[in-house]
Image (cartoon, helix red, strand yellow):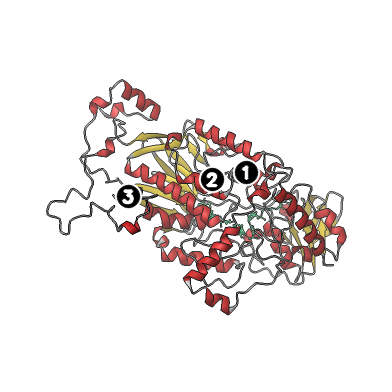
Amino acid sequence: MVAKATVDSAEGASQSLRNGSLNALFELGEHPVDESPKLKVAVIGAGISGITAGILLPIKVPGIQLTILEKNADVGGTWLENSYPGVRCDIPAHVYQSTFEPNIGWTEEYAQGNEIRDYWQRVARKYGVYERLRVNTKVIAAEWAKEAAQWRLMLEDVAAARTYSEDFDVVIAAIGRFNAWKLPEYPGIESYSGRLRHASNWDPDFDPQGKSVAVIGNGASGIQVVANLQKIVSRLDHYARSPTWIAGSFAGEGEGRKLEPLYYSPETLRSFEDPAVYLEFRKKFEGKFYGRFETILRDSEGNKKLREEFKTSMAERTKDKPELLEHILPDFSPNCRRLTPGPGYLEALAQPNVNFIRTPIAEFRTDGIVTTDGVVRKVEAVICCTGANTDMLPPFPITVPGTGSLQDAWTPDPYTYMGVATPSFPNLVFIQGPNGTGYSGTVPNQIETQTTYIAVLLRKVASQRVKTFAPSKAATDDFVAYSDAFFARTVWTEGCRSWANGGRPGARIHGHWPGSASHLNFVRRNPRWEDWEWTYKSETQNRFAYFGNGRTSKESPLDGADPPPDLVKYLKRPDEIDLRIYHEEWFDV
Ligand SMILES: Cc1cc2nc3c(=O)[nH]c(=O)nc-3n(C[C@H](O)[C@H](O)[C@H](O)COP(=O)(O)OP(=O)(O)OC[C@H]3O[C@@H](n4cnc5c(N)ncnc54)[C@H](O)[C@@H]3O)c2cc1C
Ligand SMILES: NC(=O)c1ccc[n+]([C@@H]2O[C@H](COP(=O)([O-])OP(=O)(O)OC[C@H]3O[C@@H](n4cnc5c(N)ncnc54)[C@H](OP(=O)(O)O)[C@@H]3O)[C@@H](O)[C@H]2O)c1
């Protein structure tokens, strides 16, 4: 029987083919070569990554049946969940937007969180993302079913408090790097009777005006929260266990920026209405974010220059409390942790109502916090800006029977092929996964190019009737070896604690791509299919089974079709032909 001869690995398939047993059973499929069976794909998460996938994949992958599963009640991810005082992008909004849906109407240079949220919801609406979206749906487990070659997702309907399961051919995890936020684990924290919140879980009913408040953490969130709360609270205790560099800006833009909003003038906004003017503005501005990559290299002139620049500007900004500087200036180089411009932060630290506390926290009491030197500081509220799961482990089990869990495979460090997939975890890909994003450039552009890479992969899977795909271990090991050699040249592997190294100074870097954003965009252009292992839907495992009946679908109704199908799409006006991409567009056949 044919079914008995089915093989479940590429190696098994080629072995069988070599001895000819399966090819003896081969019969032509009665379908045109370009007719793809439906590919049922789930995207987990509807932040910028999920929204971008919801736009690009249906256009780029014929035959895809896409569902976006989102635990929240709406799309937006980071920008839906974070509403703490002062939340805004710290790179300019004209750079932190979809590259194909630019917004000439940003009101401020560094837009506030709700303007960013509204923008992405508008983009999602315009491109039909909501039609593919299932909200209030939390993925609580994923298990691979080998026979069916599908992922079984356990889903929780958050609104109705019920669970159910659904099967998908491919799963794309777009769950965000900073979504699984967590409170610190200090003795006594559960007995604290004041207002205790993580910044990503801001309580809109809490009015900090005139209160004594502790803010734990000096990452980008803590820096924004301190700068904004200092002005309205009676006392602010800022617990910062590591020193940090405070940048003027990321790319030399907005130098000398203050806490106050930077509104665009009506004249500037009007000038953006001219598409040529706006494009020139965007190209200049966005281009800056691809520069300065040299500054991540150890002992580079660029990095030394940053150190001097930042030292000078930090001294100037703390001149009202000069003793602060020695506590906040790091030994490690700028860029080891992600830079933060922090407008208003150092100025806030220099105010008399702020205590800057580097002594580690020992425990919580019902009414405050005790540091390891025995000092007790009572506060009415504690805001934890303590970040998220820096190990990057997905917060729900992902299991392949016989292999184990992804969580185990990623311990002590995430193990991926180019940040996209992991060996032995078939039909599972990541957007913004470990090592998947270049440090320079912009997050929206990186998400778009990564989604495009995945689209090319899925187009192959759908059109060539692939049953399972996963990167090989050999290719993944080579990628890891390259990465580690590259990271050793960078300041990221110096002695700082950051989400890029899992909070372990000097440990492996899993937060960044080993190279610049331009390097990554170059690499992603041409997928290396030889690094992947494939099995096919055909029971014979003949890789050419998808060739079908020897025709394309357009040719089948050729006789008598009115109008006749365009079988010569390649014919264009010669002056419109770009020979560099001529005969390479996937949709022109
Ligand atoms: C406060 C804050 C400010 C930031 N500012 C900047 C900035 O200025 N510039 C910059 O470049 N980057 C910034 N970032 C980083 C930011 O997270 C990314 O730029 C980008 O928004 C990430 O988008 P994403 O879709 O990958 O992830 P997210 O926005 O985190 O979205 C992930 C989505 O997945 C959903 N999800 C997670 N788990 C599940 C599950 N089990 N089931 C169903 N759904 C699930 C979540 O609900 C969420 O909607 C900031 C991050 C934070 C936290
Ligand atoms: N637009 C923006 O301005 C903006 C705002 C927020 C976030 N972001 C993005 O999101 C990323 C994450 O930012 P984040 O601030 O949420 O997290 P983060 O950069 O990881 O910072 C977390 C902070 O909490 C501290 N911390 C963690 N656990 C602690 C504990 N148990 N006790 C005391 N301190 C503890 C960390 O100290 P150590 O350093 O000592 O570990 C660090 O200072 C940023 O790098 C950025 O990419 C951007």
Question: What residue lies at 86% left-to-right and 63% top-to-bottom?
Answer: 321
Residue beneath label 2, please?
A: 396
- Residue 124 position in % (x across, y down): 45, 63
In-front residue for pair 38/207 = 38
Query: What kind of element bears circle 1?
Result: loop
Instruction: Indicate which disc residue 391 carries.
Output: 1
- Residue 232 position in % (x across, y down): 75, 71
In the picture as drawn, the residue positioned furthest to the top comes out as: 19
Q: Is residue 412 visible?
A: no
In this picture, residue 538 sits left or right of residue 411: left
Q: For the residues carrying marks 3 and 1, which lies nearer the camera in this image?
A: 3
Q: Residues within 10 Å of mark 2 (few under 14, many from 20)?
A: some
In-front residue for pair 260/221 = 260
In-front residue for pair 580/244 = 580
In this picture, residue 237 sits left or right of residue 73: right
In-front residue for pair 445/535 = 445
Residue beneath label 3, please?
A: 63
Per the model, the C-alpha gap separating discs 3 and 2 is: 29 Å
**Of the residues under marks 2 and 1, which one precedes in the sequence?**
1
Callout 1, which amino acid?
Asp
Query: What kind of element bears circle 3?
Result: loop
Callout 2, which amino acid?
Phe
Q: For the residues carrying marks 2 and 1, which lies nearer the camera in this image?
A: 1
Q: Quadrant of residue 396?
A: top right
Question: What residue lies at 17% left-to-right and 56% top-to-bottom?
Answer: 564
Q: Residues within 10 Å of mark 1 (few under 14, many from 20)?
A: many
In the picture as drawn, the residue positioned furthest to the front comes out as: 575
Query: What kind of element bears circle 2?
Result: loop
Per the model, the C-alpha gap separating discs 3 and 1 is: 35 Å
The reply to whether the residue tagged 2 has its Cβ within 8 angstroms of ligand 1 is yes
